[in-house]
Image: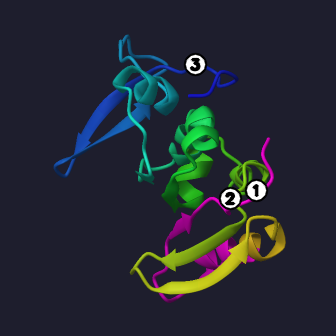
Amino acid sequence: MGDDEKQNNYSISLQDGSGKLVDSKNINTNIQIQTLDSVVKQANFSPNFIKIDTDGFDFKVLRGANNTLKTYKPVIFFEWDKIHLQAQNEDFLSIFPQLNKMGYEQLFVFDNFGVLLCSLPTSDLTNLALLMNYTQESRQNIYYYDIFTFHMVGAKKS
């Protein structure tokens, strides 16, 4: 989580052979959560590709990788799921202006079947909102998207 992230208590829930973090306000659990920035620094690692699929924690992971993204400018691939993000009290558009400011200006949007649907600028919040709302209205079984973005050479630095 980023420096400005509120600390929450989480526990690990195992379901169908997969584990995930769940909010555990009433459970006395002690799980240490580190930012990607701190993990990269401790490991003395220079990432060139970051894949995130954390069922709604994706934006928290990205905000916790602010220094890593600015320093190493890795390619980023993450899941964009309205229901999972809302479960974490996330605005489903909030990460895109931050990515844009760091030089990640173009998005490639894939459906949950891996089909490339479109390419949009990170600044196009209107069409991003339309895409996300389509997941709620679609009869095509499109429940979420995968987003691929890379740092633009010569892009503005923050």
Task: Please state the extent of the stretch shown in magenta in the rendering.
Answer: 130-158
Describe the element under mark 3 as helix, strand or loop: loop
Q: Quadrant of the N terminus?
A: top right
Residue to which mark 3 is pinned: 7
Residue 68 spot, x, y in % from top left: 55, 37
Q: Is residue 9 left or right of residue 1?
A: left
Q: Earlier in the sequence, mark 2 or mark 3?
A: 3
Return the mark for residue 104: 2
| Quadrant in the rendering for residue 43 | top left
- From what the image shows, is residue 112 above or below residue 118? above
Q: Is residue 120 left or right of residue 67?
A: right
- From what the image shows, is residue 25 above or below residue 52? above
Depth order, front residue of 119/130 = 119
| Quadrant in the rendering for residue 28 | top left
Residue type at the position of mark 2: Tyr
Describe the element under mark 1 as helix, strand or loop: helix
Describe the element under mark 2 as helix, strand or loop: loop
Residue 131 spot, x, y in % from top left: 67, 77
Residue type at the position of mark 1: Asn
Residue to which mark 1 is pinned: 100
Looking at the rendered image, the disc whose residue lies closer to the viewer, 2 or 3, is: 2
**Mark 1 crowdedness (10 Å alpha carbons): few <14, some 14-19, many ≥20:** many
The reply to whether the C-beta atoms of the residues labelled 3 and 1 are less than 8 Å apart is no
